[in-house]
Image (tube, rainbow, N blue to C red):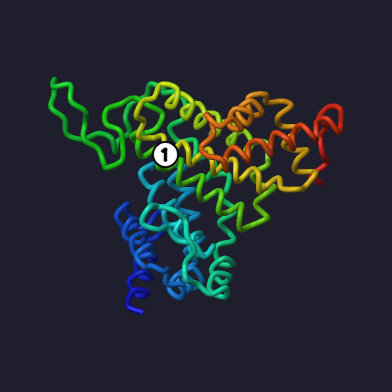
Amino acid sequence: MTKYGITSHLIEYFQAKHMNNSLHTVQLLGSIIKADDPPDYMVLRLICQQHNLTKSVSTLLRQFYKFKKEWFYQPLLEIIHCLLMAAAGLKEDEDGKMVSAKASQAATKALLDQLRPMTEVISLIMELMLVGTSPSKQRKPSIVQIGISKKGSGSRTVSRAGTSHGVDSQSSLNSHTQASVRSLATTVLWLLVEMYPSSHNIILSQANLGRMSAGLIFATRHISQTRSAKIRNPELASDLEVQRNLLRAAYIAVGNDAKRAQILSNFCSKNSQFIRVLQDASQKYKAADSHAQKYAASLCHLISRRTNSTGTARRVNTGR
C-alpha cells in the first residue's frame, strides 16, 4: 500500500492547471504504474476508481494538445498504453512482444470497466498519430524551444528533451519522438477498438477515416521507400507498427457488419487514395508483415463486395 500512497499523492498534481504538474510528474507516475511485472491490479484499480485517473489523463491530453505542449504526448500515451495492456491481460516481454500476463478475469474486468471513458478521446488519439506527418511550415520556435546557443556559431538551440532544436517545422518534437508518438497512438487505438465495441462507429466517422487514411498513406509510403532504397531508417519499425495497428483497428471495427462495411465503401468512393493505400498494403513488399497484408486484403475485399452488390456505393442511414 506504500506504492498506492505515493501514486495517489502524485495524482493530486495531475491537473492541467496545478502548479506542481510538470513533465517530470507525468513521467514519474508512468514509471510507477509500469514498474510491476505482472501489473499490480489492486493498485491500478484503486487509482482509477478512487482518484479517477482515466478522467485526469483524458483531460490532460486534451489540454496539452490544445496548447501544443507536445512533449507531454509520449508519457501520457505510455500511461494509457500500460493501463490498457493490463486491462487486456497482456504485457510486453524483453523483446517488446505482447504476451499474456498473470491476471484473473475479475481483475482485468474491473480495470476494463474503469478505462471505458478513454474511448471518448479516440478522435484526439487519432490526431496524435499524425504528429510529424504534415509538410513543414515556416514558423518561429515556441518559447520552450528557445535555449542557450552560441551566437554566430550556427549551432542548434538547446531545448527540453524530445524536442527539435532550432528547426522550423510543424511539430516541435524531433523525428524519433514523433515516430514513437505515432506508434504509441496507433497501439492505443488498436487496444481500444479491440476491447470496446462502442468505439467501432467512432473510428468510422468521416473525420477519423480521413485521419486513418493520412496515417496509412504516410506509413506505407515510408515503408515502400525504405525497402526500395535499401537504406537504414531508424523510424521504419514505427512505420511498420503504425500500418499494422491501423489496418487491424479498421478490420476489427468493420467486422462482419454490413452497415459499417458500407460506410467504409462510401468513404473510399470519394477518397481514392484510401483504397489505393489498402491495395498497396495488401502487397507483401509494402506490408508490415503477413498479418497487415491479410487485414488490407480483407478490407479491399469487403469494399469491393459492397460496391459490386449495390452497383455504386450508396449512403447508409446510420440513424443520425
Q: What residue sits right under mark 1 in the picture?
A: 237
Q: Quadrant of residue 194?
A: bottom right
Nearer-the-camera pick, 245 or 181: 245
The three-letter amino acid code for the residue at tag 1 is Ala
> Farthest residue in the bottom direction?
1
Percent across and percent down for residue 304 are: 76, 31
Farthest residue to the right: give it. 310
Nearer to me, 139 or 287: 287
Residue situated in front as seen by the camera: 170 or 38: 38
The structure residue drawn at horizontal position 41% and vertical position 34%, both measured from the top left corner, is: 236
Image coords of residue 315 (percent x, y): 81, 34
Image quarter hosting the C terminus: top right
Q: Is residue 218 left or right of residue 297?
A: left
Depicted 197 relative to depicted 53: above or below: above
**Does residue 298 lie above or below 119 as drawn?**
above
Q: Position of residue 270 (x, y in %)?
A: 72, 25
Q: Quadrant of the N terminus?
A: bottom left
* Left or right: where 30 falls relative to 308: left
Task: Count residues near mark 1 (Cα–Cα under 10 Å), then give few for <14, some for 14-19, many for 20+.
Answer: some
